[in-house]
Amino acid sequence: MTAASSLRSTTGPLRALLLGSTASGDPDGADVLGEVVDEAAARFGDATAYVAADGWLLSFAELARASDEVAAGLAAAGVGAGDVVALALPSIPEYVIAYAAAAKLGAVTAGVNARLTSHERAGVLATARPHLVVATPDLAPHPDALPAGADLVTMDVAGAPGDALAPVRVDGGAPRPLDADPDRPVAIVFTSGTTGQPKGAVFGGRQLAFITQVDTGGTWAGQAGAAQLAGTSFAHLGPMTKLPGNLMRGACTVLVDRWRPGDALALIERYAMAGVGGIPTQVALMLRHPSFDERDLSSVRAIVMGGGPSTPSLVREARRRFGAAVSVRYSCTEAGIGVGTAFDAPPEDAEVSVGRPHTGVTLTIRADDGTVLPPGTEGEVCLASPATMRGYWRDPDATAAAMTADGAVRTGDVGHLDAHGRLVLAGRRRDRYVR
């Protein structure tokens, strides 16, 4: 199937996405995730989409088929549009299958970070109020912590690959067609909770469509195969909102049980990865690892750093030793997407700033009263775009406090715009993420 013929035969939100209508800030986005999963299967077929830590290979075709069958199973379990499915799972292929399955039903996926304590996970579930919780035995909530009315499905990950979701999978099943609703919630991404109880930022079809447009330009890869390493929890903002874009690129995502610098370097070499991403600490740990100079890392062409403060010396060392361009990025959970330095920008951009706004993003520096401040004046960093969260899940008061009157997200971080329009951060109040 050629790209042109596929585009002509595609309708609805995916066609709008491919045509680039999201660039206007008003995408259709009714079921971007479900449609991209199915279209990726048609384009890339048996090519590998995920490599699990235990060696299980999940193809694009298998992802589409499995998500259909799990969607049918979830529906049989009483899950419908608007219901919340909480995934208390590590970063395994079953997480992606269940997420795509829920999206195909119009249900909302709430990711529960596996690194949270049992008390924190209980708090996340209490906020999400799920209809169904899917969990591994080690992450399953205590019966007393299971929200009222919620059912629990415990996955047996010790069995054969692909069998763990059998309790909610109907062999040969498929969901009913989904009514178009671009404002329907798709994902709840919880904040870290470093400043209090984690809050659930809600992202719908419009937000995912816009993020995917920015990530891909609405263009599908000609063929599958480029490998990338999953360095963060699937419950994180990036995996939850960038999944459609990763599938459109035909990316092969390599999973690890736990990120370790030596293992990361070995996988980068083994799969000849062109890109390296992580928080600055992860990049620094790789550079300091004894095996770094023994590895053939010549495939690396781009390094993305975010999620924490980087230093000019780290940026320069990463650029020199990897022999690759560096992009430093900044955002927050609520904003969905933010700012970054371009790979082809002058080297100093990534050394002294976190860059300029991505396409469609409005960046302002504001005083406490919301007044927009001029360049060179320090204030609160505020971000607005079609990727901005719809609000916090069932928390209108917190939503109002997090937003300006004109709809920008108050990041809680302090910074200023320099003479070149670059954002220079001066302080940190909330978590920042790789975008």
Image (cartoon, rainbow, N blue to C red):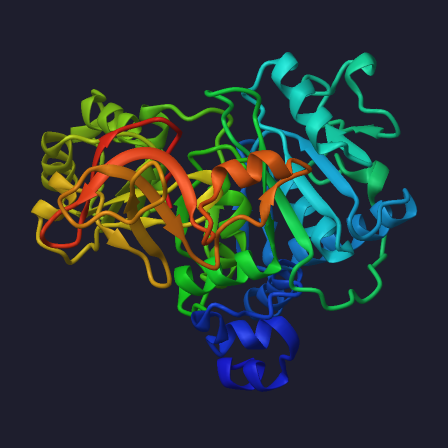
- Of 224 and 110, the residue lying toward us: 110
Question: Is 374 placed above or below 87 here?
Answer: below
Residue 313, position in %: x, y? Answer: 9, 30
Where residue 166 appears, x then y in whole percent?
82, 39
Q: Nearer the viewer, residue 3 or 268?
A: 3
Relative image position of residue 242 (x, y in whole percent): 49, 51
Tell me what residue is drawn at x 65 percent, y 53 percent: 63
Q: Where's the N terminus, which quadrant?
A: bottom right
Q: Is the residue 78 above or below the residue 1 in the image?
A: above
**Residue drawn 65% across the image and 39% down it:** 393
Residue 222 visible in the picture: no
Q: At x 62% / y 79%, what residue is drawn?
A: 10
Does residue 245 appear in this view?
A: yes
Give the number of marks.
Answer: 0
Q: In the figure, is residue 356 to the left or right of 263?
A: left
* Side (left or right) of 369 relative to 119: left
The image shows residue 97 at horizontal and vertical percentages of 67, 46
Instruction: Say if 195 sits above or below 256 in the image.
Output: above
In-front residue for pair 193/54? 193
Quadrant position of residue 283: top left
Query: In the drawing, does residue 302 fall left or right of residue 432?
Result: left
Q: Residue at x 69, y 37 (%)?
A: 394
Left or right of 424, for residue 153: right
Q: Quadrant of residue 140?
A: top right
